[in-house]
Image: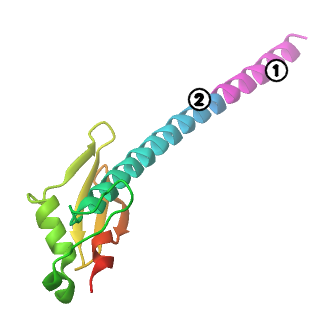
């Protein structure tokens, strides 16, 4: 009888330990997924902020912006397809990385391939996401 009680107690202890480990693992996974969601939201908000800044570059000041935006990009920039270079020198003159979130170690750098603006995000020192944006002013080139 004592042996049966000991075996039953041992099995109960194994079940409790496995249940505890499963609960701990699931809570850890939940914490990681929350962090990933937070990082994604931070990057998305930063992309929208930069998209807004790019939308205001080279806006025609004579047009009532309450109704629509009109752009007056430099013709030489249009011909040489270097609008992206001009945007970077105007909007990002120091060319330094921006810390999007110190808490989550997310930084952003900005490059261009001539016309397109490319936002590169690094998360904890590793390459995260890259987003390519076509500035609205480039679509107004003659």
Quadrant (top left, top right, bottom left, bottom right) of the N terminus: top right
Q: Looking at the rendered structure, which numbered label has been put on residue 7? A: 1
- Nearest-to-viewer mark from 1 and 2: 2
User: x and y percent of residue 127 in the render?
Assistant: 33, 60
Callout 2 secondary element:
helix
Type of secondary structure dominating the magenta stretch: helix
User: x and y percent of residue 117 in the render?
Assistant: 28, 69
Query: Quick one: which residue is furthest to the bottom in this view?
Result: 79
Give the magenta-colored segment's residue range. 1-20
- Look at mark 2 in the image and give the residue it sits on: 24
Residue 126 appears in the picture as rendered: no
Q: Quadrant of residue 83?
A: bottom left
User: x and y percent of residue 41 in the render?
Assistant: 44, 45
Q: Is residue 6 left or right of residue 22?
A: right
User: x and y percent of residue 42 in the render?
Assistant: 38, 45
Q: Looking at the rendered structure, which numbered label has been put on residue 70? A: none
- Taking the spot 17% from the left edge, 88% from the top edge, the residue there is 80
Q: Along the polypeptide, which appears first: circle 1 or circle 2?
A: 1
Quadrant (top left, top right, bottom left, bottom right) of the C terminus: bottom left
Which residue is at the front of the view, 49 or 10?
Answer: 49
Label 1 close to label 2 by CB (< 8 Å): no
Up the image or down, 70 lies above or below 16; here it is below
Residue 124 appears in the picture as rendered: yes
């Amino acid at each position: 009888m004592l042996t049966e009680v000991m075996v039953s107690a041992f099995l109960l202890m194994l079940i409790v330990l496995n249940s505890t480990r499963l609960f701990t693992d699931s809570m850890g996974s939940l914490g990681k997924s929350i962090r990933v969601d937070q990082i994604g939201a931070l990057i998305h908000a930063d992309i929208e902020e930069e998209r807004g800044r790019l939308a205001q570059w080279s806006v025609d000041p004579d047009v009532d912006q309450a109704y629509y935006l009109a752009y007056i990009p430099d013709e030489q920039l249009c011909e040489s397809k270097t609008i992206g270079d001009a945007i970077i020198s105007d909007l990002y003159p120091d060319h330094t990385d921006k810390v999007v979130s110190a808490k989550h170690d997310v930084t952003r750098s900005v490059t261009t391939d001539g016309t397109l603006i490319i936002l590169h995000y690094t998360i904890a020192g590793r390459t995260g996401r890259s987003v390519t944006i076509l500035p609205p002013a480039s679509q107004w080139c003659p």
